[in-house]
């Protein structure tokens, strides 16, 4: 960073632009709700329908539909298992692997 130099007793420092800040921080937040769904399902422990509904703001039946439709079309294989009283879903592989 450049040291500001006083000009006529006034110090001016240029502030970085938003675009420059974006490039520096490399924002990694998923762009769409489907991307967020995929990221959550790829975790080792997966997620419950309730967690996915809170994450996306969708109804539970919409989350199930996205897993059965959109994710399947993208080539993901979603497994489910009962852990205690709850059912957890996760992506185990992509189709064709």
Image: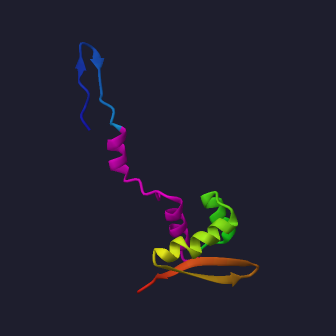
Q: Say if the magenta span includes residue 22.
A: yes
Of residues 48 and 66, the one nearer the viewer is 66
Q: Which residues are magenta?
A: 18-45
- Which residue is most to the bottom? 97
Q: Quadrant of the C terminus?
A: bottom left
- How many numbered marks are there? 0
Q: Say if the magenta span includes residue 35.
A: yes
Look at the picture and state if 48 lies above or below 21: below
Seen at 37% across and 53% down, the residue is 26
Residue 16 position within the rendered picture, expressed as x and y whole percent measured from the top left: 33, 36
Relative horizontal placement of residue 62, taking residue 6 as reference (left or right): right
Of residues 62 and 24, the one nearer the viewer is 62
Seen at 42% across and 57% down, the residue is 28
Seen at 64% across and 66% down, the residue is 62
Residue 53: name its quadrant. Answer: bottom right
Q: Main secondary structure of the magenta part?
A: helix
């Amino acid at each position: 960073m450049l040291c500001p130099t006083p000009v006529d007793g006034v110090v001016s420092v240029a502030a970085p632009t938003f675009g420059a800040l974006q490039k520096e921080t490399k924002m990694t937040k998923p762009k769409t709700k489907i991307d967020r769904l995929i990221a959550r399902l790829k975790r080792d422990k997966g997620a419950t329908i309730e967690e996915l509904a809170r994450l996306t703001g969708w109804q539970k039946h919409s989350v199930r539909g996205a897993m059965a439709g959109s994710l399947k079309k993208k080539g993901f294989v979603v497994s489910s298992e009962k852990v205690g009283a709850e059912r957890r879903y996760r992506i185990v592989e992509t189709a064709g692997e």
